[in-house]
């Protein structure tokens, strides 16, 4: 708070902390001590013009970005609002401000914290993926060994479907590892050709065993029809 001579009459703790002065240093001093030199030298002229003509640039506005000066000489990015009151013919100017420099510093700290959390998340995902991959490889190896034993045709089909599911899960784990690299820019997208008919057949093989048990369906053609692949075959000749 300052009078019409721009002498500081009141200052709160927040202003002292922002500009780096004590209240005793500010009280009784001119407001322009808180401004860069190139602005401070013109400030009295601006105030006199305002008092004479009521032409305002900052006074009465909702907020204007300005540059302030810290005690150590560093610049402060501020949004300043100034209101005027007149009592017994005496003008009083009350200023309030928001320290954008502090907000920017807080934002940068939050960004750094989020970056660190992202790194920790990527590390956790990568580590867990490796932990899951180890027993999955063991399961896949046992299925390979079991496939070479004396099995019925149905049992061999079940083993084949189990191996297909295990391979799919290992591929998912590989994808998780790739996504964990995305935050560091290490992910590379590939354009790989594949056989759509083979893909559909593999999906059906995995699902057929469950459908067979739940609906007591033995005919593979009936299972295809349940999933509307008969319609796809007729329209697009995929199978």
Image (cartoon, rainbow, N blue to C red):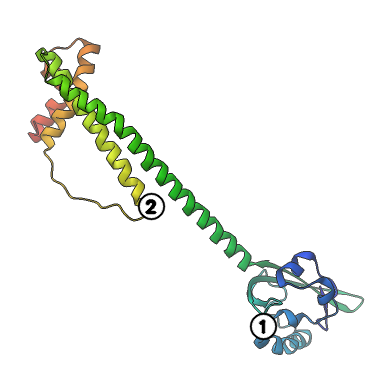
Residue 140 visible, this orientation: yes
Q: Residue at x 25, y 28 (%)?
A: 138
Dot 2 lies on which element?
loop
Location of residue 98 (image quadrant): bottom right
- Describe residue 59's horizontal placement relative to residue 220 as left or right: right
Q: Which mark is residue 142?
A: none
In space, the residues marked 2 and 1 are separated at their CA atoms by 42 Å
- Describe residue 9's horizontal placement relative to residue 139 as left or right: right
Residue 33 pos. (x, y %): 74, 82
Dot 1 lies on which element?
loop
* Residue on which disc 2 sits: 183
Q: Nearer the viewer, residue 91 or 238?
A: 238
Residue 47 pos. (x, y %): 75, 85
Q: Quadrant of the N terminus?
A: bottom right
> Mark 2: few, some, or many residues within 10 Å (few <14, many ≥20)?
some
Q: Residue at x 9, y 30 (%)?
A: 233
Residue 236 pos. (x, y %): 10, 35
* Residue on which disc 1 sits: 36
Q: Is residue 237 above or below residue 109?
A: above
Q: Is residue 43 above or below residue 100?
A: below
Q: Residue at the far right: name it.
A: 88
Location of residue 162 (image quadrant): top left
Q: Nearer the viewer, residue 234 or 149?
A: 149
Residue 152 pos. (x, y %): 10, 12
Q: Nearer the viewer, residue 138 or 129?
A: 138
Please tell me whether mark 2 or mark 1 is closer to you in this view. 2
Residue 227 visible, this orientation: no
> Mark 1: few, some, or many residues within 10 Å (few <14, many ≥20)?
some
- Describe residue 31's horizontal placement relative to residue 117 as left or right: right
Q: How many marks?
A: 2
Q: Quadrant of the C terminus?
A: top left
Say which label, 2 or 1, has the lower sequence index: 1
């Amino acid at each position: 708070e300052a009078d019409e001579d721009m002498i500081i009459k009141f200052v709160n703790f927040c202003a002292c902390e922002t500009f780096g002065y004590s209240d005793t240093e500010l009280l009784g001093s001119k407001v322009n001590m808180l401004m860069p030199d190139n602005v401070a030298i013109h400030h009295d002229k601006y105030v006199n013009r305002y008092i004479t003509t009521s032409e305002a640039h900052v006074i009465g506005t909702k907020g204007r970005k300005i540059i302030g000066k810290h005690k150590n000489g560093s610049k402060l990015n501020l949004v300043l609002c100034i209101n005027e009151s007149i009592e017994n013919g005496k003008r009083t100017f009350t200023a309030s401000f928001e320290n954008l420099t502090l907000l920017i510093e807080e934002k940068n700290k939050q960004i750094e914290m989020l970056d660190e959390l992202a790194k920790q998340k990527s590390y956790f995902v990568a580590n867990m993926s490796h932990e899951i991959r180890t027993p999955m490889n063991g399961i896949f190896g046992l299925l390979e060994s079991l496939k070479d034993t004396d099995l019925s045709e149905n049992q061999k089909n079940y083993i084949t479907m189990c191996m297909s599911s295990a391979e799919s899960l290992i591929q998912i784990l590989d994808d998780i590892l790739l996504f964990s690299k995305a935050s560091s820019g290490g992910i590379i997208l590939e354009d790989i050709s594949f056989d759509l008919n083979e893909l559909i057949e593999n999906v059906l093989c995995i699902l057929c065993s469950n459908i067979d048990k739940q609906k007591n369906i033995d005919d593979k053609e009936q299972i295809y029809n349940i999933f509307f692949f008969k319609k796809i075959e007729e329209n697009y000749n995929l199978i």
